[in-house]
Image (cartoon, rainbow, N blue to C red):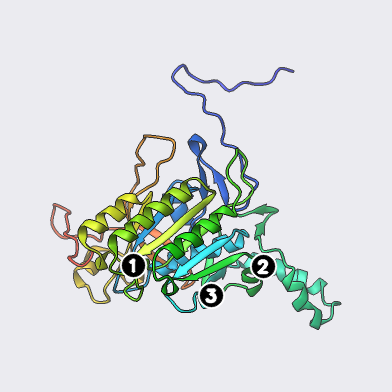
Amino acid sequence: MASSKVRTSSFSRKVPAAPTSSIPGLKYGPNGTIFLSSGIPDLDKILGGGFHLGSLVMIIEDTEAPHHMLLLRTFMSQGLIHNQPVLYASPSKNPRAFLGTLPATLVSKDDKSIKSDAEQKDLRIAWQYKKYLGENKPPIEERDGKVEYCNDFDLRKPIEKHLIAGNRVECVSLLDCSSLTGIRDSCSKFLSQLPRYDGNITSAGRIAIQSFCAPQCEYYDKEWDMLSFIRSIKSMVRSSNAVAFLTFPASLLSQSVSKRWQHLADTLLSIKAIPDEDKELATLLTGYQDMLGLLSIHKVARFNTQVPVILDATTYSMKLQKRRSLVLECLNQAPVDGASGCSSSSKNTGTLDF
């Protein structure tokens, strides 16, 4: 029996199907690109699949609220769930203590019922041995026999301790680095331990740097040295199987240096907190009371293509679904009076893209 062929017109173009990745947390995209999950399903969908492997992701912080930490926590937790090595650097004396604040995966009702049935079968095992079984528990979450590319996280529940202990997590304090040479060497050593891409990928790494230009760091006033470091980390990550995630408060930098930093980013996002009592914004947006902040997308990475990425919107609202998982939604404009249907945006949030 002859095999059936798919009919194509003379104007259609044959595009080979993207191969499926057997490595947890990685997904093949168009033009030979590979995506790494951000830890937020909505953000992965908006960006076309997630963060490009080998890219530099930069987040502009809001000085009024630490909402950028939500993105940082989910990014790191997703790497630990997929057993990916993580390097975390922060301007704190004990950065390893931050690992206890990472969120755990959100367990649905169906998963809870399956888990309870499995526990009933293990009742014959003495309770004092269960803690040893938990240490050997596989860290990779599966559903219906398939490894999930991106998980939903419960921001109210801390990550399981065996995930932190069973993964190679390196923590660096930016306070111990009198110059940027120390953190540059730590990143270089971390990336050198990852296998280079030779057509096959066996693992991927994540670098998370929090508040890079914090005032408590000794290199705080060395703007050009920090710019040189960002160029170095971008070059190192580009030739490795990793993604660098860096947050910084742009208000602490001069405008010219801040623009140079943003230009170096492959993917550039910004977080803006919503004031509690902004009457103008409350009348402009629906669901204003449920919003945590606004996420703006200024730049999306483009690898192996010159076609620009066209987004449905550039500004999204950040909400907590059932006060647990972080979701992103398009802004919905509230009904306005008058026939024009136009409303001006709030001065505190700037231009809003509906």
Which disc is residue 330 wearing? Answer: none
Seen at 54% across and 58% down, the residue is 189
- Marks 1 and 2, how far apart in space? 31 Å
Q: Which residue has dot 3 on it?
A: 96
Q: Which residue has dot 2 on it?
A: 166
Which disc is residue 213 wearing? Answer: 1
Callout 2–callout 3 Cβ contact below 8 Å: no
Provide residue 126's location: percent of width, then percent of height.
84, 81
- Residue type at tag 2: Gly
- The answer to whether residue 39 of the structure is visible from this angle is no
- Residue type at tag 1: Cys
Provide residue 200's location: percent of width, then percent of height.
62, 41
Task: Give the crowd class for mark 2: few <14, some 14-19, many >=20 residues within 10 Å.
Answer: some
Q: Nearer the viewer, residue 62 or 221?
A: 221
Task: Give the crowd class for mark 1: few <14, some 14-19, many >=20 residues within 10 Å.
Answer: many
Q: Is residue 353 above or below residue 161?
A: above
Provide residue 266's location: percent of width, then percent of height.
38, 49
- Residue type at tag 3: Arg
Front disc: 1 or 2: 1
Q: Compare marks 2 and 3 and give the one earlier in the sequence.
A: 3
- Marks 2 and 3, how far apart in space? 14 Å
- Marks 1 and 3, how far apart in space? 20 Å
SS type, badge 1: loop
